[in-house]
Structures are given as C-alpha cells and as structure tokens.
Image (cartoon, rainbow, N blue to C red):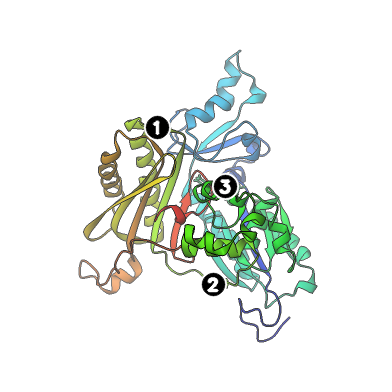
Amino acid sequence: MRDGTLPGVSESGPRVVCHVDMDCFYAACERLREPALRGEPLVVGMGYESGETHGAVATASYEAREFGVESAQAISEALDALPRKVEAATDPTLDVDEAGFYRPVDLEFYDEVGAEVKALLHEEGGTVREVSIDEAYLDVTDQFDWDDDPRAFGSRLKRRIDDEVGVTASVGIAPSMSAAKVASDHDKPDGLVVVEPGDVRSFLAPLDVEEVHGIGPVTAAELREMGIETAGDLAAADPATVGDRFGERGREVQRFARGEDDRPVEPKGKPKSLSRESAFSNPTDDSERKRERVRLLATDVGERAEREGALYQTIGIKVVQPPFDVNTRARSLPGPVEDADLVESVALDLLAEFADDRVRKLGVRVSNLSFTDEQQASLTGFAGDQGAETATEPIDTDGSTGNESRDLADGQRSLTEFE
Ligand code: TTP
Ligand code: MG
C-alpha cells in the first residue's frame, strides 16, 4: 500500500496498470449458455441468420481461426473455409471434423456478460477505464506495488473472471496503459504477460510496428515504406521525421514505442462519437456488396447508440480506396435523433458517390452526440448546444478522445483512420 499517490502520477514509483481483454468474446459468451460449443470451432456472425450465408464474421473461436476464419470476413467466405457441422454431416464430400458451428450476434446478452466482468474489475478497488464491451484498463497502483508480485495479482484476477463469469481473459500488466495493452495481446488466448518497469522498451523493441498501441494497418504500411518495421525501429527513428510525416499522433505513438506513456487511467466519460468500420479481404467495386456492408455497419452503430442512450445529429461514412485514400462524408440533421433507419438511409445516400469506386474499407459514424438522460432536462425538441463537429481528431489510442471506434477488420480501435 502506498499513501498519497495519485493514479497516473509516478512521483512515488511506477504505476501498476492492467489491461484486460476477453478472448474471442462473443464466442465465449455463446459457449457460456451453450456449453456443448466449448472446444469447437465457432463463428459468431453479424447480420447472420441460422442456415443463411449473409453477414460478416464478428468473431471466431480460436479453433475456428485455425481454419482461416477471421473477424470482418464475409460469412460466405468463412463457410468456404469452415462449413457448418449440420451440412458436413449430410454431405459425403465434407468432413465433420473439419466443420464448425455458426451463431448470430446477440449483443444484449454479450453486454450483460461484459458488464459482469466490469463489475468484478470495479470490485478490485482500483481505477477502471472501460474501453469496449470486452476490454478495460485497471490501475491498481494504490492497492499494489511492483514488489508485491503483480503476476499473482493477474492470476487471481483471471481466475475470478473465469470462476465468477465463466469467460477467459487475457491480462497484461505494465507501468503504462499502452504497454499493458500490448502485453495483454501478446500471449492470447488465456494470456498473462507482465512487463516490469524498466523492461518496457526492450519488451516492445522486437515487435512488429503494427503492434504498437495506436498504430493501425494504414500507419504501419506508411512506416514500413519509411523502413520502420519494428517498435524498436520506431523508437530509434528521428522524432522530427516522424513528426513531419504523422504530426502529433506520430510523436505520441513513437513515445509509446519508447515505453513513454504517462496518461492516467481515467474513468470513462461519455463518447463524442460512435463508429464501426470494416475492411473487405479484397477491394471491391461491387456496389451491392458495398451497400450491404454499409447496411450492416449502420445497423450496428444504430444499435450501439440506442444501448448507450445516445442521440446523434450527424451521420457520416468513411470510404477507404486502395491503397490508403481515406474519404469521409457526413450530413448534419436539423436536430438530434435516434433513428437506426435514418443512419442506414443517410449512410447509403452518402455512399452513392462512391458507387463505382474500388473500396478497401467502409465505416459508418454517428457524432454530435447528446444523451437521453441529459436530454430529458431540456426537452424542448432540439437540446441546446450539441457542440461543433471537429474536422479532425487526435489519435484515439484508448478512447481518451471520447470517440468509440471499433475497426472490424483490424480489431483495433483506430480513430486514426477516421479523421
Ligand atoms: P476483440 O477483443 O477485438 O476480439 P475477440 O475478443 O473476439 O478476440 P481476441 O481473443 O482476439 O480478443 O473484440 C471483442 C468483440 O468485439 C468480439 O468478440 C466481437 C466484436 N468484434 C466485431 O464485432 N467485429 C470485429 O471485427 C472485431 C475485431 C470484434
Ligand atoms: Mg477480446
């Protein structure tokens, strides 16, 4: 125990920051209520219905990943790699052992499970920052010291999550948020990676530059073009060069690569925007495929806004043309709404401009948010100040900008690319 230490202030020694990320979370939730799915290849599809071939993979169990199934893949593609058990059983050309189970997304249920994990983290007494449905930071500096065996703490935390909620977490423990995040991802699934103070830079150095917190595939590709392949390369690069090319966000990820990150773990405020993105495995100019993907993304964003009680006044899309040409379009409404159909129709409308273009990735975003709880206080129709929409935003490395973004393809929160 240490007295008088403000979380994030390192005067009295390095902080103890945990990053907790559930393993194949939606699949783990499905296994919770259907234990027969444990150990089986399992795919959870967004926009998927039983027996159908439409939709996109939200997540796949590690057994299904062995067959090449991955997040954001079209279900039809996943089915080519991993047929359904029921079909394999009746088709003599297929092998039942090389087949798997498919389930549709049930966000309401996953939210409940996610909330149980978060509640358990809050019980630990530290500062919790909830990042997404299956991810959170926990600063236990006030409870705990680096001399107090953080590995034992991590094991206990993992065991609690397993015993009390029934899902598996990977945990990273390090003296900063960005290092803890990389650590939790380093030995998935069921991982526990502890990076001692003083070891952060050497732990990161050999890793691919894309593993540095805050670097998405687009930035990674640009860095590689500059000959920066590993976190060590980035750490050693000339800060002026990195700054010229990538601005302040470049300087920040370079600091992360060097193990410099004193951002405090702060409990989360309300998000400023909600977005969802998804990449095609191969760029496509097929207008119907693009429209279908935007429909899925719009539905997802609409549902998320509803769950968070968020009204939005701006609806936008992002269209990435190969290789890295990022276009954003947005439309502002006369007042805040919560209308999932409108998200879809506005997003499709905005997409029309790109109907014939080859597209690598699509995103849908709602912004200019207000919240229903606040709204009630000023129910005059369109509540007062919605805030001006900013044209660009700083890098989102942990949701600290308040913009919730999930990159469906990359599994990264990559606001970097939605600027
Ligand atoms: P992740 O933590 O990125 O992925 P995961 O928990 O499924 O797998 P991992 O073991 O690698 O952590 O995302 C959490 C949930 O968010 C995931 O279970 C489903 C959802 N999600 C999507 O809907 N689409 C996506 O493309 C990704 C990456 C996640
Ligand atoms: Mg996860």
Which residue corresponds to the image point at 52% horizontal and 71% vertical from the top-left?
A: 267
Camera-side residue of 120 and 345: 345
Q: Which residue is mark 3?
A: 224
Query: Can the viewer see residue 398?
Result: no
Tag 2: amino acid:
Glu
Ligand 1 under 8 Å from disc 1 Cβ: no
Vertical order, 10 against 324 (above or below): below
Camera-side residue of 209 and 359: 209
Ligand 1 under 8 Å from disc 2 Cβ: no
Between circles 2 and 1, the one closer to the viewer is 1
Measured as percent of width and height from the top left, residue 84 is found at 56, 26
Please tell me whether mark 3 sits on a helix, a strand or a loop: helix
Tag 3: amino acid:
Arg
The quadrant holding residue 184 is bottom right
Please tell me whether mark 1 sits on a helix, a strand or a loop: strand
Which residue sits furthest top?
92
Q: Quadrant of the N terminus?
A: bottom right
Q: Which residue is mark 1?
A: 284
Vertical order, 265 against 207 (above or below): below
Query: Can the viewer see residue 324?
Result: yes
In screen coordinates, is 235 left or right of 203?
left
Q: Which residue is mark 2?
A: 266
Q: How many marks?
A: 3
Local packing at callout 3 (Cα closer than 10 Å; few below 14, some 14-19, many 20+) is some
Tag 1: amino acid:
Thr
Give the mark, 3 or 2, whose residue is nearer the N terminus.
3
Measured as percent of width and height from the top left, residue 416 is found at 46, 56
